[in-house]
Image (cartoon, grey):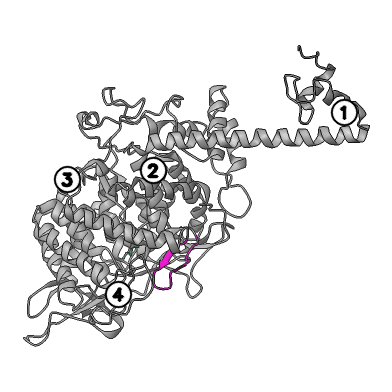
Amino acid sequence: MHPRPAPPGGALALSPGGRPDGGGARGPCWPWRKWKQLSRLQRMMVLFLLVVLMLFGLRSYVHVADEWTAVDSRSAAAGQMRPANPPVLPAPQKAAENPEAVAGLSPQKPQRHFRRGPPNLQIRAPDGDPQERRQDRAQRRAEVVGEAGWGAEAQRDGLRWRGAGTKLEQGPRHPPKKAEFFGWPFQQQALRIRASRTPQNERQKAVVDAFLHAWAGYRKFAWGHDELKPLTRSFSEWFGLGLTLIDALDTMWILGLKKEFQEARKWVSKKLRFRKNVDVNLFESTIRILGGLLSAFHLSGDILFLKKAEDFGNRLMPAFRTPSKIPYSMVNIGTGVAHPPRWTSDSTVAEVTSIQLEFRELSRLTGDKKFQEAAEEVTRRVHALHGKLDGLVPMFINTNSGSFTHLGMFTLGARADSYYEYLLKQWIQGGKKERQLLEDYLEAVDGIRKHLLARSEPRKLTFVGELNHGRFSAKMDHLVCFLPGTLALGAHHGLPAEHMELAQALMDTCYQMYRQMETGLSPETAHFNLHHTKILKDVQVKAADRHNLLRPETVESLFYLYRLTGDRKYQDWGWEILHSFNTYTRVPSGGYSSISNVQDPRHPQPRDKMESFFLGETLKYLYLLFSDDPDLLSLDTYVFNTEAHPLPIWAPS
Ligand code: DMJ
């Protein structure tokens, strides 16, 4: 039987229960007859319902299609170990060795260094959530039809929060920036770190095991929160931004934990939102969140991380709006209101001088100079200040006057430590051209030698003490144990050989801070014995300093010392330390916990907290320490920020 012709107006297609070909169980005319029997109101309602259903259908189709595209590109991206922009590029054959060359970035093709022309539309961001991809597509369309720059920027400004309050920041507008931002990072020659493809030795596998154990606890009990509380199987919030997850992203990539990385990446894409009424500490959030996102971007090549970094960087900028240009410690990333801590108008010197690597890199990647300018202005001002002692800086700086406060107190520990680290590392990052940074660093190392070094009894360990208005104190924070690594790194980059000698002497001391404790774990602060006696050990501990927070500085320095000397004793020391972490801080249900007493192996008193830097730094440096591959994050290609996030060294121009 031939179907009857469809009634005019295509009503069949809208008829509930009918088939588009006009057929049906009760004969072709049945639905039409029924339709005609309906009142006008009933027909309107049916039509309305159908339209609503169609709209829903269309929406879910678009969503599912987006998800599938994302899954596809994600699995493709998963095999790609591609830092987006390593300026010190490896020999091309290295990339060629890798069969998973990125489309359009074939190692055979000539290198395209720092090309800043119009974006190459063939090169797509590897991934992103559907909304972000739609924004990208809109941006690219605008560029194709010649709307890039002013038009596209205006369009994006509407989407993007910039700076204080709800007001959009009216910064200088530079039309070419967006083209650079979207185009150039993907046009670089591919350098892949071969982490997940390099066979792991037994010690590295033990680190991976430790990481997975820590991650399992975080995943089960603290997913998306700042820190795991492994004993109570809960979490604590500091900024409420998934701190541990972000800090751990690049560690997962380096350890070859692709599945875990992808799951975390999905959280960043779907859940991480910075439009939040929350105060963050400028320094801590810069080194952990901004540094973590930038490094994840470089290693994975996934633009999602760069976009998040740019968004976050913009939200930190109000911190620099102070009378002195020395930033406040705290900034609300939702309201854009920045302020010093409640009890003072000071910031610490380490805080304001250890954000430069990240802000400079953010400017380089986005083409937006404001980040770099704000951070470097701080460097310039601190450089010119009075109150230093042979290159050593006091611990506090006032955000109104821009001057040092609490003069006469000098330490390489808390509140000043990474000032010294970032002098050297910025100099390396910038291609060793910024002389002022180098001079300040060299002067400071001389200042350390002159004023802060001493030797303990009975083992004559060289340590870095503190100076308080001319009085020397034989006190050294575990934090100071970053120094051997930094000194060794400087020597590797051409600074005097004595720096390496001092690095080795201090490395012994930091190891002894672990070795001389009953648990094999260092206290937070050591007091060195200066008296000739055989009864006392070199390392003395006060009751208030007996805790261990799973800090990284010693294993960080062990990594540098092994990488740069090849002496295996450093690996063995790190292996002992990992063993102690596993014995005294590992919580069976998942995670590791800081402890309150490193001198009591029977009751180390777990504190119920796993700091984000245990995954971001401690385990990463242990893994790198046990690697015998100098190309795994080569020290000639990358510089690690103070939270162990590798950033590329810029090519010399
Ligand atoms: C980390 O956040 C960084 O290493 C910082 O430089 C010092 N404090 C912790 C680790 O101890």
Query: What residue span does the magenta drawing correspond to?
Result: 225-240
First in sequence: mark 3 vs mark 1 = 1
Q: Is residue 509 visible?
A: yes
Label 3 secondary element: loop
Q: Quadrant of the C terminus?
A: top left
> Do callouts 4 and 1 mark residues in contact (Cβ within 8 Å)?
no
Marks 4 and 1, how far apart at CA: 92 Å
Marks 2 and 4, how far apart at CA: 39 Å
Circle 3 or circle 4, nearest the eye: 3
> Do callouts 1 and 2 mark residues in contact (Cβ within 8 Å)?
no
Q: Quadrant of the N terminus?
A: top right
Q: Is residue 218 left or right of residue 508?
A: right
Identify whether 582 is placed above or below 257: below
Circle 1 or circle 2, nearest the eye: 1
Residue picked out by circle 2: 297
Residue picked out by circle 3: 630
First in sequence: mark 2 vs mark 4 = 2
Residue picked out by circle 1: 34
Q: Residues within 10 Å of mark 3 (few under 14, many from 20)?
A: few
